[in-house]
Amino acid sequence: MLSIDLTGKRALVAGVADDGGFGFAVAKSLAEAGASVCVATWPPALNIFLNLLERGKMDESRKLASGAMLEFERIYPLDAVFDVLSDAPEDVRESKRYKDVGDFSIGGLAERLVSDFGDKPLDILFHSLANGPEVKKSLLETSRAGYLAASSASAYSLVSMVQRLGPLMRPGGSVCSLTYMASERAIPGYGGGMSSAKAALESDTRVLAFEAGRKYGLRVNTISAGPFASRAASAIGIIEKMVQYCAANSPLTEELSATEVGSTAAFLASPLASGITGATVYVDKGYHAMGMAVTMPPGTEPLGA
């Protein structure tokens, strides 16, 4: 019987701040498959995340199928819009939520990993990072600053992480990220330049698959997940409607679970996916395959029901 076995592998999941999103589900699935898991958390959310862990508020979510608890080898601070600490403005470095966490840049993360685990500490890198400060604005209303901020946090952060963490990964390692179908289709309400950022992320995935494959022996893929009502996604403002619409109009009509995305991430990180790189893998109940809505406006007959 084929099984996903990541025993002896170490993973870093960047973008975990609670137990309700894709990042946590990915971390849990990797641990279920036997990997040791480190996570990186945005500094403004770090103390809240640590407090929830310490108070046992995530204990139910942390239970693995074996009965053991999901444990994180390390929890690192990370603000992935900064390549090195000196890139962060002084007011950020000295702010209450940043000043006591140490080097929160991508370069700082790389240094901490080497310090904690040696020269080649990683086998798996999962990028679960996105931020669009103007996501509720239409593209026509989006400022240059908002557009570039979305691309910096949501797309270039992957490039920077592969630049700095790729050399720390063992050959045969896996890099994966999360994208969304707005990269290729117009999704009203998903604005602020986030659709462009996701398109850039997918393009960068293909280029990085070639470059990091040749240079480091790594595979690079991205998962195009369907809409999911996580705490982070609530910033979009219409996430519940997006979830309901996709469930009503997908080939498989149940809502997407975070575990389904986590399981796909574990597969892509495993030797079972050794021939897959440069791919956008859809985990959306088949919604990407549809060309017309099944649920029609009031007064019309549904199609194909």
Image: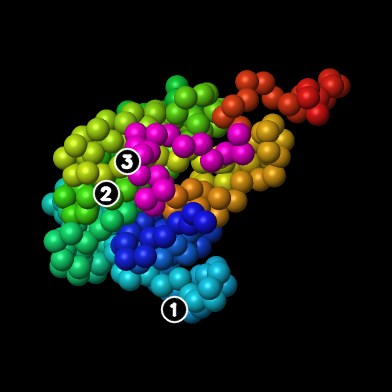
For label 3, the crowd category at 10 Å Cα-Cα, with few meaning under 14, some 14 to 19 and many 20 or more, is many
User: 196 or 226, which is in the foreground?
Assistant: 226
Compute the Cα span from label 1 to label 2.
35 Å
Q: Nearer the viewer, mark 1 or mark 2?
A: 2
> Horizontal and vertical percent for residue 80?
28, 49
Query: Considering only order in the chain, which callout, 1 or 3, is on the residue closer to the N terminus?
Result: 1
Q: Is residue 66 visible?
A: yes
Q: Which residue is tagged 1?
A: 54
For label 2, the crowd category at 10 Å Cα-Cα, with few meaning under 14, some 14 to 19 and many 20 or more, is some
Q: Residue at point 57% right, 39% down?
A: 284
- Residue type highlighted by circle 1: Glu
Q: Residue at point 54% right, 40% down?
A: 283
Compute the Cα span from label 3 to label 1.
34 Å
Q: Secondary structure at mark 2?
A: strand
Which label number is shown at residue 220?
3
> Horizontal and vertical percent for residue 151?
33, 35
Q: Disc 3 vs disc 2: Cβ atoms closer than 8 Å?
A: no
User: 114 or 233, which is in the foreground?
Assistant: 114
Q: Which residue is tagged 2?
A: 172
Write the start and end of the magenta stretch as one range.
268-286
Q: Residue at point 41% right, 48% down?
A: 272
Compute the Cα span from label 3 to label 2.
11 Å
